[in-house]
Amino acid sequence: MSVTAQLLKVFRVEQQLRGLKSRLHTAEKFLAEQEKQLAGLTGQHTKLASEHKGLRATIAGEETETASIDARMAKLRDQMNSSKTNKEYSAFLAELNSLKGKKDEIEKAELGQMERVEAIKKQVDELAKSIAEREAIVSKARKDVADRAAEIKDRVDELNGQRSDLAKDVPGDALKFLSDATALHGDEAMSVVEVIDRRNHEWSCSNCQMTLPVELVNAISMHKLTRCNSCKCILFTEEDVVSKKAPKNGEVDNEDIVKSKKRVAAKKAKPAAADAAKPA
Ligand SMILES: [Zn+2]
């Protein structure tokens, strides 16, 4: 069996795995997005809660300070009442005025801080509500992921086993070739060579419809791993498919080719080209 035919077998199993895992991947993507949003909300909450705490501590400090100013001012008033000279009185008055000014300044700053504290508190409460809602969504999304993974586990294990068995016989660089093409094209990573006109040596890549040079088709028939120059899909021929499924009497009634031909027919814009694709 050619390396291409071996790769085709691996590719078919990988296709089934991808199909099977697609619902799981959708659930995983949803979960990741929800977790990201939750982390964002939690981060905002932590930041604001810490600002809230800091501001409240500042306000508490200022209140202590104004209380001590009040006490000092009361004492000064007593001292003023019992002062014996004008000079003494003036000195107490000057200190009293200076303390009044300081107290006003502190109270003005405090007012702004209290408004900010109130606004932050509102935001913190709203965030806490959003976090609780988002946590419920995340928890449901986690369950969905676990459920979907459990649903397909047995079949995935079975297919993974098949894939490892098949891959064992395939050279590493060929597998790398396949994984590169799959990263690029997913389920279209391998493309069957379409015979346009065998007598006139005309072939095309069923994936991108570009005409394939004779040398490329010759390379494939010599069992060389070959990629389409245009779309970089790994090319295989009917022979590779036949060797995989071995239809009776050399008859090519292959699913891959039927599917590929349908796709080609659907893709081809020009009716003339579609006619040309029919085997002579
Ligand atoms: Zn191509």
Image (cartoon, rainbow, N blue to C red):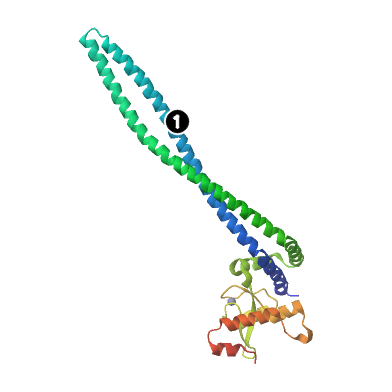
Badge 1: how crowded within 10 Å, few (<14), some, or many (20+)?
Answer: few
Q: Image height check: is 167 above or below 74? A: below
Residues 97 and 248: in front is 97
| Disc 1 residue: CB within 8 Å of ligand 1 | no
Q: Residue at x 58, y 58 (%)?
A: 30
Residue 173 is situated, as x and y percent measured from the top left of the image, at 68, 66
**Farthest top residue in view:** 84
**Farthest right residue in view:** 248
| Quarter placement of the C terminus | bottom right
Q: Image height check: is 226 above or below 161? A: below
| Quarter placement of the N terminus | bottom right
Residues 254 and 231: in front is 254
Q: Image height check: is 275 above or below 156? A: below
**Where is ligand 1, by quadrant?**
bottom right
Q: Quadrant of residue 51?
A: top left
Residue 58 is situated, as x and y percent measured from the top left of the image, at 42, 30
Q: Residue at x 58, y 87 (%)?
A: 274
Q: Left or right of 101: which side holds 160?
A: right
Residues 163 and 43: in front is 43
Q: Residue at x 24, y 10 (%)?
A: 88
Q: Residue at x 74, y 80 (%)?
A: 242
Q: Amino acid at mark 1?
A: Ala
The secondary structure type at the circle numbered 1 is helix
Residue 179 is situated, as x and y percent measured from the top left of the image, at 64, 66
Q: Which residue is mark 1?
A: 57
